[in-house]
Structures are given as structure tokens and as C-alpha cells.
Image (cartoon, coloured by chain):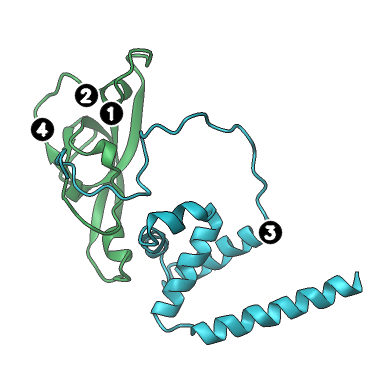
Chain colours: A cyan, B green
Amino acid sequence: MQDGKGPKGYHDVGGDAAGEIPMVELPWLHWEKQVEAIRGLLGDGTRRIVSLDEVRRGFESFGVEKYNTLSFYRRRLEAMTDILIEKGIVSRTELDRAIEAGKVRWSDLDEKL
Amino acid sequence: MTRFSAGDHVQVLALGKEGHVRIPHYIRHQTGRVTEYCGTYLNPEDLAVGNTSGRAVDLYRVAFLQRQLWPDDAIPAQDTLIIEIYDHWLRSVKETENAP
């Protein structure tokens, strides 16, 4: 880079002009807490299956367009599943099947309510 | 024995590394002072690529003058930013006039 300070990723926005800051408290959704809980378990000292830094590396290589489209926890979720697949811990097929099963479970529940 | 102690003047290096690093662009080349030694941790640059058997590295808390980081006269002269920086991103410098 011209300024000699080395690479600056699209996520590295500290000090960039950002305009007005929206002073709104965002809700912490249940699924977002689940993402954090699973990430915590995958990354803890006894397992070391997926580290937080791996997750960061994951969303820092999404490409700026995808990165900016996704929310904070969506980025973490996407990067985490990418890495689980990359490492062969789960396969894409297994994951898709689990998502389908989950959708069925939730739609059954909706009908009962 | 750590390379730096609280009060030491240091400059943040620009290592030119690709991939995941924890040292934001805005702090590279800046000079500040070590406030605290935080212990040793696995290098996040190794962890980012799944390497959990790398050497643990020293981590320091380093203070910088906000005014030096952001060109804005409205910032009070005594305001500092404290950020954690790994040993390999720091070099020793002689006294600097703009370190807190």
C-alpha cells in the first residue's frame, strides 16, 4: 500500500468516516445467542475445533459485498459453518439436511399454535 | 523476561502481513507507551489458519495520544487510546515527544 502501513482489509474501518451513528439499541435475538454459544463451545481450550480468529479470518475473506450484506451474527454464523465444512467436521449435505429438518420442526410448531 | 515493561516507548510496526491480523491499520507506525504486560497468548495469526501449536507470544497494553491518532483539535490533549498489541508488532524507540 502507498502509505507503507501494509494491507488494510475491508473490515478494518477504524478511523474511517462513517457518518451519523444510529443510537439505537439492537435486540439480541435468540438465534444470535445460540450462534455465540456454539462458537464458544467449538473454540474453548479443551476442544479448539474452530477458534474465534478462524471465524474472523473466514468473514474477512467473504469479499466486501457479502460482508456488508450480512449482520454481525450472520457473518459469524456463515464463517463458522464455512470452516466446519472446510475442516470436514460436517458436510454441506449434512448441514442442508439438518436445516430442512429444522424448518419442518418449526412449521409443525407454527401449525399447532 | 519480557522485551518491554510499563513506561517503555514503542512504535507499532507495519509487518505487511496478509490474512487475519489483530493490529488495525490506523495504529501502525504510531508511537506510544506500554502501560501493562498482559501475559502470553497463542498468536491469532496462527490460530486464524487453524494452527494451535504455534509459539505463544507476549501481549502488551499500549497507550497512544488520541490527538496524535486523529487530527482534531477538539480532542482533549490528555485523552489516550489503549490497545493490546502483540510483541512482534512492536519495536523499541527512544523517548518521543508525542507519547502519553
Q: Residues within 10 Å of mark 4 (few under 14, many from 20)?
A: some
Q: Quadrant of residue B49?
A: bottom left
Q: Which residue is mark 3?
A: A30
Q: Residue at 64% across / 43% down in the picture? A: A26
Marked residue chain, label 2: B
Read off the chain for label 1: B
Pointer 4 indicates a residue of which chain? B
> Which residue was labeled with disc 1?
B64
Marker disc for residue B99: 2
Query: Of helix, strand and loop, which one carries label 2?
Result: loop
* CA–CA distance in space, label 4 to label 3: 48 Å
Q: Secondary structure at mark 1?
A: strand
Give me the C-alpha separation between circle 3 and circle 1: 38 Å
* Residue B95: % across, % down: 12, 24
Q: Amino acid at mark 3?
A: His
| Disc 4 target residue | B93
Q: CA distance from mark 2 to mark 3?
A: 44 Å
